[in-house]
Amino acid sequence: MRPLDGITVVTLEHAIAAPLCTRHLADLGARVIKIERPGVGDFARAYDERVRGLASHFVWTNRSKESLTLDVKHAQAQGVLMQLLARADVLVQNLAPGAADRLGLSFDALRERFPRLIVCDISGYGADGPYRDKKAYDLLIQAESGFLSVTGTQQEPAKAGCSIADISAGMYAYSNILAALIARGRTGVGCRIDVSMLECMAEWMSFPLYYTFGGAQPPQRAGAAHATIYPYGPFAAGDGKTVILGLQNEREWEAFCAKVLLQPALATDPRFASNSRRTAARDELRAIIDTVFAGLTAEQVIERLDHAQIANAQLNTMHDVWQHPQLEARHRWANVKTPAGDIPVLRPPVPDAIAPRLDPVPALGEHTEAIMAELGYGQEAIDRLRAERAI
C-alpha cells in the first residue's frame, strides 16, 4: 500500500507549481485526474521538444496522471466537473486570477455540497490584497520576493537556473494538502488552502530578510560564492577545473590553513581571525588561495580538502549529473513510459518502505473516454460531446 492509495485528486493545472504538487501526490499513490483544454492541453506541453519531441517541464511534472480533455467554459462542463468532485478528495487549481471563482469552483461555492473536499488554490499573490489580480510567473516572483536582489554578481542580478518560485509553491501546496488530509481524518471536514508564490518565496528569503533587520545593509551579490561566509564558493585549480568548497567554523578554518593551504600560521593572522574579518578581506584571502590552488589539479585540491574534512563539491554540468556515481550507487534511476517511448526518471525522495508510483506520462486526452464512461456517459453521449468540442 502507498500512503495515498484511494485518494482522488482533480486538478485544473498548468505550468509548474500545481503540476509538481499533484505529481508528488501521485508518487504517493493518489489518483490524479488532470483536466486539460481540448486540442491544446497544458501549455507546458509546448515549452520545448527536448525529450524525444516532448517538453522537458511536462515529462518532469506529469507522470502517473490521467489526462481528461474538457472545455471548462462549455455548457456541459459544469455537470462533468461536479460529478468528478463528488468522487474527489482534493481539488487543485492554478488558473488565472479569478477564473476558478467564475467557474463556480471556489471553496465557498463547493463546501456545502462537498463538505469533505479539500480545495487548494495556487496563485502568484494570494486571494486578496492589492496584488491579487496580477499575473505571476516564476521570474516575476523571483523579482518581487527579493531573490534577484541577492543573486548574481555585483554587476548584474541573475535568476535561479530552475523554476524556484514555482517549485516552492508546489512543495508548500503538497505539504499542506498532506496536512489537510490528516486533519480531515480527524474532523471529517475539508478545508481551503491558499498558496501564494510570493509568500512561499518570502519564507525562503528569511535569512536575507533577517540579515537586513533594522535597516542593515543587505548581503551583496557574490556570484556563486556565499555573500556572508568566506571562503565559501568556487575556486579554480591549476588544470582549469573548478572546485566548490565551504568553511563553516573556526575549527575548519584552522584545518584548511594547516592541511589544504599548508600555511598553519595563517589561521591566527589578524586579517582572517573570524568569519566577519575573512569576509571583509575576501580579496586578500582569495589571492592566497588562488596561488596555492594554481599549483594543484582539481583532483589534488579535493584530496586535500577531504583529508582536512572540509566540505567540497565538483562544479558538475547537467551531463555530469546524468552520470553521477552517487545517484547510480543508490539506484535512483528508473524508467517510465511516455507517448514517445520509455525515458529515465529519478525516483522521488520518499521513504524506502514506499514503492512510488512510476506510471506513464499521459498523452493529451488519453483517459477522456474511460473517465467519461466511469461517470456514466455512454458512447453516444461521449461522441456528441466530442463533436461539440466540449471534450
Image (tube, rainbow, N blue to C red):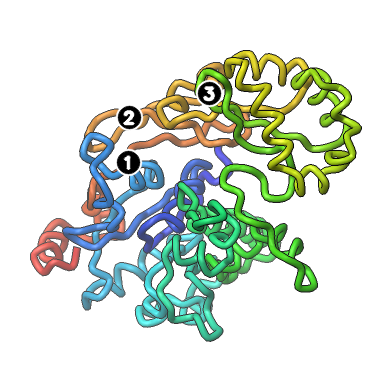
Give the position of the C terminus as an image quadrant: bottom left
Label 3 residue SS: helix
Residue kind at label 3, given as amino acid type: Leu
Apparent side of residue 178 relative to residue 11 in the rendered image (left or right): right
Disc 3 to disc 2, how far (Cα)?
16 Å
Disc 1 to disc 3, how far (Cα)?
23 Å
Tell me where residue 301 sits by quadrant: top right
Apparent side of residue 185 relative to residue 358 in the rendered image (left or right): right
Disc 2 to disc 1, how far (Cα)?
10 Å
Image spot of residue 113 (x, y percent) = 48, 76
Residue kind at label 2, given as amino acid type: Ile
Residue placed at 49% from the left, 61% from the top? 90
Residue kind at label 1, given as amino acid type: Val
Asked if labels 1 and 2 touch by Cβ distance under 8 angstroms, the answer is yes
* Residue wearing tag 1: 361
* Residue wearing tag 2: 343
**For mark 3, does the 10 Å Cα neighbourhood hold few (<14), some (14 to 19), or many (20 or more) residues?**
some
Q: Earlier in the sequence, mark 2 or mark 1?
A: 2
* Residue wearing tag 3: 327
Image spot of residue 110 (x, y percent) = 47, 77
Label 2 residue SS: strand
Of circles 2 and 1, which is in front?
2
